[in-house]
Amino acid sequence: MQDTIRTLIIIAVSGMLIWMSVNQIFADMQIMDDTDMAAIDGTGGLSIGLDNIAYYFQADNVSYTDTDTGNALELGHLMISNGQKGPATIQAGNVDVNHDGLMTPLTIDVATINNPQSPVYGKAVAVFQALDWLEETHLQVEELRFCGQELGRLDIGAIHRPSFYWVVGAHDSGVDFEYGAQFSVDALRLTYNSQNKNLAFSGIHLASQIAGLPERPDQWQLNGMFQIGALYEGRPATFDVGTDDTGMVGIEMNLPMRGCLRVENIHWAGQDFGPMAIDGIQVHRLNVRFTP
């Protein structure tokens, strides 16, 4: 989904630039008087409203292959939709998803942290923020295969992300970032045989805090955003591409995180195991390396 959001942002900004370019083709430059100039305010970012954006993606096969062994993770017949084979939808700027009385658009800003007390004082960052993001997305994989082994059918959705943000900076040749989101998924289901038996996690929720007794999902209240990285505190998540001591090229990530994870019900092979709660998550350092 992160790739999907970044793609949508690029599409939105590109569309805006194309629209501006087309209009400039048919418009002559004119001198503005003092009254017109006084009505213009300079700003340091973009606000983008999305009115019922619809998108649909389907691929016969998406795979990640180890070039040394030929082993692969394969997603056969991948579909991103609304769960009914129709387009997924996104809205922002015309809905009040977090019920704060405002309809906030997607905003993109570039700034420098100017607080002398901050451990990252003087750092330049780009900030992507959507506090009212209405999303209905469903991901479906008909054939999930790992190292040649058929694992079954995977369904994830509907995915809801009412509020999220990205803060992105740089270090040397890598990327520093902080990501926060309040995140819910109706169900994650792996159907692993022809009898339709499955492992299912229903009502998955990520937030900074989740109030309510763990055994009473109907009383849960999500507050704040689950956070990966703490860039403003000097402990960002990081993304680097390079070689290790053996000369092997790879992608290395450090993903500190904090928040709460709760699941309303876990279902396995016809049995319900009830809710699950993992509160007060504090991961100070989590190194992940991908080597092709």
Image (cartoon, rainbow, N blue to C red):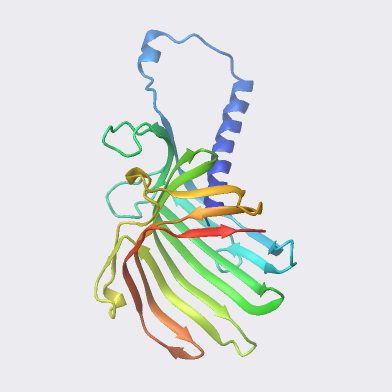
Location of residue 151 in the rendering, given as x and y in whole percent from the top left corner:
63, 79
Instruction: Answer with the quarter of the image where residue 117 lies.
Output: top left
Would you identify the image quadrant in which residue 49 lies? top left
Which x, y percent locates residue 234?
35, 44
Q: Vertical placement of 274 versus 237: above or below?
A: below
Determine whether 111 is above or below 285 in the image: above
Considering depth in this image, is 28 or 16 the residue closer to the camera?
Answer: 16
Q: Left of 172 or right of it: where is 180?
A: left
Left/right placement of residue 292 relative to residue 241 reads right
Count the marks.
Answer: 0
* Most distant residue in the left direction: 212
Q: Nearer the viewer, residue 31 or 212?
A: 212
Residue at 33% of width from left, 74% of height from top? 277
Residue 281: give x, y in percent of width and height: 34, 65
- When the figure is inspected, residue 27 is found, relative to residue 97, above or below; the finding is above
What residue is drawn where x is 56% and y is 13%? 29
Left or right? Give the position of 52 relative to 236. Answer: right
**Which residue is at 70% across, 63% downward?**
66
Nearer-the-camera pick, 230 or 1: 230
Q: Residue 126 in the image: x percent, y percent?
A: 44, 38
At x 67%, y 59%, the residue is: 292
As drawn, 266 above or below 207 = below
